[in-house]
Amino acid sequence: MFQKILIANRGEIAVRIIRACREMGILSVAVYSEADREALHTQLADEAICIGKAPVSESYLNMERILSAAIATKSQAIHPGFGFLSENEHFADMCQSCGIAFIGPSGDIIGKMGNKSQARLTMMEAGVPVVPGTKEPVYEWKQGLEIAEDVGYPVMIKASSGGGGKGMRIARDAGEFENHFRLAQQESLHAFGDDTMYIEKYIEEPRHIEIQVLADKYGKVLWLGERDCSIQRRHQKMLEESPSAAITGELRQRMGQTAVLAAKAAHYENAGTIEFLLDKNKNFYFMEMNTRIQVEHPVTEMVTGIDLVKEQIRIAAGEHLQMNQEDIVLKGHAIECRINAEDPEKNFMPCPGTVKDLHFPGGNGVRIESALYNGYRIPAFYDSMVAKVIVHGENREDAVRKMRSALGEVVVDGITTNLDFQYDILNHPVFLSGNTNTHFISDYFESQESGEINAEI
Amino acid sequence: MLKFKKTSSALLTGKEPEVPKGLWIKCDACGELLYKEDVKQNHYVCYKCGKYFRITTKKRLRMVMDKGSYEKWEEGMECKDPLGYPEYQEKTKALQEKLGIDEAVTCGKGTIHGEPAVVCVCDGRFLMGSMGYIVGEKITRAVERATREKLPVIIFTCSGGARMQEGMVSLMQMAKTSAALKRHSNAGLLYISVLTDPTTGGVTASFAMLGDIILAEPGALVGFAGPRVIEQTIRQKLPEGFQRAEFLLEHGLIDNVVEREDLKETLAKLIAMHNQVEPKEALIPNRRKNSARLEERKSKEQVSAWERVQRARDKDRPGALEYIQEIFTDFTELHGDRHFADDGAIAGGIGYLDGCPVTVIGQQKGKTTKENITRNFGMPSPEGYRKALRLMKQAQKFHRPIICFVDTPGAFCGMEAEERGQGEAIARNLFEMSDLTVPVLSIVIGEGGSGGALALAVGNEVWMMENATYTILSPEGFASIMWKDASKAPEAAEQMGVTAQELKELGLIEKIIPEAQPANPKNLAKIAGIMQEEIRRFLHKYLPLDGQQLAQQRYERFRNM
């Protein structure tokens, strides 16, 4: 086992990893930028090294400085957390060449899964379902029609250069395909000067379901249930839960086994996440694999009782996974709300500032992951997520009630947060019904229809 | 500060991490640690601060030459030790073994993107790349052989200067290499020198600065006296950037600064531009268009002379560089007069018309205030005229026709211009242009302001755009001299005979190029299209003439005025 680990990150995840180290009796080394001198992770770690100026390119993304810090402190491993260098294959390779264990998969695997088209190909070969369609460019509507017939309606006609909804059309049957194809192509040509199109299956009312996996160096792969991350705004997840309200036992088994298949196909090692899209008919399709610990990992920890960060460290140290698949039993229901220093009234603009008065809830089944403390000045250079509130209840209803109570107790004076917005989600009848999809926020909160919602479970 | 209990410290027993040797390097400019593999990918340029690292001969050749094409010449010459300098021979032997190179220069032949060339590379690790007998001899033999085999020469310079250990024998290498290059030049062959960090002393004062084209790597230190010597002599601290490649460019001493990444491409392109072509066949004018078409296109509108003056000065009017980009392909700009500065008011370089290399020179105004500061409102200084002349002489050496675009309110009237001999510079151009042995065409595209315009207009033919003017003096100046009233400029314009039509009637110009109205970026392609076809006709007519005929024709053209 390692005796000293350097944490190449900041904020709550750095604190989370330092805590795991402390519990395991491993010395922790924090790295910090000049803007993070007062940060909690800087103070909590056994050692802390300044690695440069506030901008991330000169600190948390500066591979050479971080490696120098690791070598100077004789750290045996580096935990990259999420974001920053966590999915940088080059950095993983550099660590390896210096004899430092990178807590995550090898650079090779990071590279393979990071390349979208290669990952898709690997998954198709392994028999993992991917969103049907083509990565071949299409220029003629007749050629497009053939592909559409192949993948089945509805299909999404997408401009290669597209963006902001321009050059995008949904065709629901063969009759309207030609018309939509021509329109989308023309739009793309006008907007981007490019008439290259793609055809893929349109996933209706998609849910974002991801499966957590753990894999050791010896080919053993376990899956640890799912997380439903459908509550997201512009692809930014806001609230995650496990288990998903949309998944039954049999589907969960199938998705879990598919995730294991996917991880094995990638020769995966360490903790990873397979992201799927689940359509309204309960078909699921591989989207991508995240080769790192994720923000929402605590919900899986709550329902499985497994400490994912500790498992990551053990795997990187070359230990065998001690548990077996049958040992993994999902218990109860967990929800996580991300608390961001941002103003929902002003288009979620980040609002850093100084925390004047802080109170976090506690109690049975309530967990806080945060790097805030009284008097802490949040620097403007980094991500606006400042805390995660996680609750664990007997069932979804219990968990929702617990989360409402917990959020109601949070006090973060001095900065604007999205707390009230999260509270509104927890009270929304559609959320309560469990019948959500990735369009939930844009459908109910950004179309001015939300109005007053006062539902009770 | 928050007081936390720390983890009880355990003794570290595991294997300590360490940096394998050679995996990392430290940038001596920014002090950052760099991953060597990334530095290599980045052509040995620091990816943090952009500092150019000095590179070995082997890496340089690998970077520039086509794979497997390079053949080394004249290796293993006997070391001369004229002064019997203590331990000199032992030292050079040890360096040969350690560095795996023969001497401070490696010479040979190879191809660059398929273009054959003699390439010499100096290596600063070998006694500072200093030039002793062997360096001088190897370069001289390589240049002589290039002359025999009619090949271009490229030398990558990197040297502290003459080799002290060899005394005066070393100094003579400067004259020997220069003499060999003179013969190579006299044979009409191309020499490109590429200055790398550092190039100083006797190498700068010989083969480094003799290139037909001189390129430099960004940030390279190049000078005769080293910065420390200068500081000690004048007892002053030298300013930041002094003697660096960018400083040399600004001071007109080199043609361009080229990024390492683009070096191979640039060299191949320049060699190709100097390859002998048979241009006479390349330039076939469109026969269907007869010469009457210019008359047909001429607009029927009645325009006053003053209105033409206004049009010629319009800021939307296309400038020389716009026409150059439109008419020629692959235009490569070359800079500097090699003496004092690079004048922004005159731009020049080489481009292709129908595959035929052409030297193009133009006076250039700015469109914005900022541009006008660099372009000095299109008013050339003496160094501008000297740059133009340098490029024309080069065109003559390589048998390239010359096209000049004239567009200036006049030569710059300023103190500095006088100090450096504005009058002499203009006179010199008239003098030298008169007997150039290549076709010269000048086109007045906007304002043809007096002597400042004439200095680019001693052509075999001179043309004007329909709305260009060519004047002895600005109409404002004329009015104030003749009538003591500058506001009478419109009347002056009528009186002076400044329009293309009047000048053609006087027989001072040959051709008027019609302009789609108004002459602005929107109509540029149309106007340039007509101009291009006319240039093609001009070249078709003049390229078959020999040098003497061309000079004679030009002589008589002005003799009869």
Image (cartoon, grey):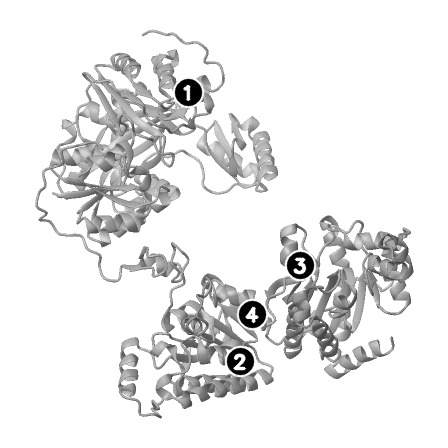
Q: Estimate the spatial distance between the alpha carbons at disc 1 and disc 2, rounded to whole Å.
A: 72 Å
Mark sitting on residue B376: 3
Residue B398 in view here: yes
What chain does mark 2 sit on?
B
Residue B374 locus on image (x, y percent): 62, 58
What chain does mark 4 sit on?
B
Sort mark 1 into few (<14), some (14-19) or many (20+) by Cα contacts within 10 Å: many
Say whether mark 4 and mark 1 are on the same chain. Answer: no
Q: State yes or no: discs 2 and 3 in contact (Cβ < 8 Å).
A: no
What kind of residue is marked 2?
Answer: Leu
Mark sitting on residue B151: 2
What kind of residue is marked 3?
Answer: Asn
Above-or-below relation of A330 to B468: above
Q: Estimate the spatial distance between the alpha carbons at disc 1 and disc 4, rounded to whole Å.
A: 61 Å
Local secondary structure at mark 1: helix
* Upstream in sequence: badge 2 or badge 3: 2
Q: Estimate the spatial distance between the alpha carbons at disc 4 and disc 2, rounded to whole Å.
A: 13 Å
Q: Residue at x 55, y 83 (%)?
A: B150
* Upstream in sequence: badge 4 or badge 3: 4
Residue B35 locus on image (x, y percent): 31, 56
Mark sitting on residue A440: 1
Q: Is residue A89 left or right of residue B488?
A: left
Say whether mark 1 and mark 3 are on the same chain. Answer: no
Front residue (pair B233, B81): B233
Quadrant of the image occupied by residue A430: top left
Q: Which residue is mark 4?
A: B270
Residue A353 locus on image (x, y percent): 37, 28
Q: State yes or no: discs 4 and 3 in contact (Cβ < 8 Å).
A: no
Q: State yes or no: discs 4 and 2 in contact (Cβ < 8 Å).
A: no
Q: Nearer the viewer, mark 3 or mark 1?
A: 3
